[in-house]
Structures are given as C-alpha cells and as structure tokens.
Amino acid sequence: SQTIHQWPATLVQPVGSPLSLECTVEGTSNPNLYWYRQAAGRGLQLLFYSIGIDQISSEVPQNLSASRPQDRQFILSSKKLLLSDSGFYLCAWSARGGISSYNSPLHFGNGTRLTVT
Amino acid sequence: DAKTTQPPSMDCAEGRAANLPCNHSTISGNEYVYWYRQIHSQGPQYIIHGLKNNETNEMASLIITEDRKSSTLILPHATLRDTAVYYCIVIHPRGNTGKLIFGQGTTLQVKP
C-alpha cells in the first residue's frame, strides 16, 4: 500500500532563517506531488505541484521554493523565512496517468506546523 | 474549475445521518465532484468522489442531482470522530496536474 511521510511534524524557526521540509512517498511510482499551505482559520492554498523529477509549477509567487530531486521526494524550502510563512504545510500525492489520473484522489501527509517567530 | 458553495457549519446528533450539501451550479460535463474532510491538526482525508452517478463506499454516500448542479455527502451514522471540516471540490481533467482548489468547507460538529 502507498504511504506518505512528511517531517518534521512541528517546527519553530526565527525570522530570516532557512527552511527545509521533506516529503516522501512509498508504494507508488511517478506520482504527482503537491505542497499546500493552510493558514490559521483559512482554507488550503496550493503552493507547488510536480508531475515529475525537476518538473515543478508554482501557483503563488512567494518566499518559498520547491524541488523534486527524486521521483518520490518533494522538498519545500526557503532561504529566509518571513512571519507570514507561518502555517500548516501539507504534502500530497496522486497517481499519474493522463486524464485517468483525475479519477485518483489526493492523499495527504499529516502536515508540518511551522511557526515563524 | 467550477466553484463550490457550502454552508460554513452544521451540527448533527451522534448516531444520526449527517447530510452535507454542496452547490456547484457551474459544473461542466466532465468535471468530477470530490469530497474530503480534515480533522483538526491532521491532513485532509479523501472520502468519496463521483461524476454523475450516486456513489457509496465504506465511509459515505454521495448523491449527485440529475442536473449535476449540486450534491450531498451523507454520513449514515455520524460518530463523534466524524467532527471535521468537510470540503466539496469540483475538478476538471485538464492536462495532467490533478491539482485541487480547496474552499472554506463545512465544519460539521457531531454532538452526543
């Protein structure tokens, strides 16, 4: 069965410090991968999605970047954190396969709660 | 992608059916309706999805109106663990991205 791992679960970082959040998926190949952010009391905001290694699309211009060095590894980074980067960060995957992938749901990790102080 | 409208909150008595509505009046013919839920401090969990026919799985039933402009998620016997934010999402098979746009959802409070 497929599993998604996301770490760390919680993180407190000072303003201006770097960030690296990692997500890995097991039990599937060539997944679509996603990073979402959820600010307190708000809905989910798509940040990045990737359909393959080094193929990443950014949905919202911001202080963050994403990389996919391996097929099942997705990394969210920042060189200098801002207070506004605080939030709940979620990694997700879905099966690929062209239009048929739309009959495949997103599967989310348990998230990283980031507090920038 | 079609926009969805959900009530911000609902209450349900434990053991009773919870019926969560969703309006998607601008849905197009090949867009799917998906339902997810998010329990506090956890990642969203997939519940069910459908295109035009009603669907049922071990978690819930999805009723889609004939004109597909609205749908209802039914939790047949709600428990306290079903307290969560429920998201109704409509997606279009465009390209190969599969990205979803989550709105504010419905906060379901199951009460004893």
Image (spheres, coloured by chain):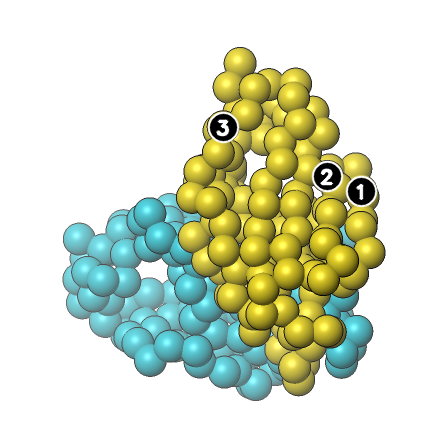
Chain colours: A cyan, B yellow
B83 displayed left or right of A93: left
Depth check: A85 or B49 in front? B49
Depth check: B3 or A14 in front? B3
Q: Which residue is mark 3?
A: B11
Counting other residues with Cα less than 10 Å from the Cα at mark 3, is it few (<14), some (14-19), or many (20 or more)? Answer: few
A81 displayed left or right of B51: left
Q: Position of residue B73 (x, y in %)?
A: 66, 43
Q: What's the CA distance linking mark 2 and mark 1?
A: 6 Å
Q: Amino acid at mark 2?
A: Ala
> Which disc, if any, is residue A80?
none
> Quick one: label 3 or label 2, which is nearer the N terminus?
3
Q: Quadrant of residue A73?
A: bottom right
> Which disc, if any, is residue B60?
2
Task: Say if residue B37 shows up in the picture.
Answer: no
Q: Amino acid at mark 3?
A: Asp
Q: Mark 1 and mark 2 in contact (Cβ < 8 Å)?
A: yes
> Which disc, if any, is residue B57?
1
Counting other residues with Cα less than 10 Å from the Cα at mark 2, is it few (<14), some (14-19), or many (20 or more)? Answer: some
Q: Does label 1 lie on the same chain as label 3?
A: yes
Tell me the residue at 50%/83% (across/down): A57
Q: Quadrant of residue A23?
A: bottom right
Q: What's the CA distance linking mark 3 and mark 2?
A: 17 Å
Report in which chain the residue with disc 3 lies: B
Depth check: A18 or B78 in front? B78
Q: Position of residue A103 (x, y in %)?
A: 76, 66
Q: Amino acid at mark 1?
A: Asn
Secondary structure type for disc 1: loop
Tell me the residue at 49%/28% (across/down): B11
Secondary structure type for disc 2: loop
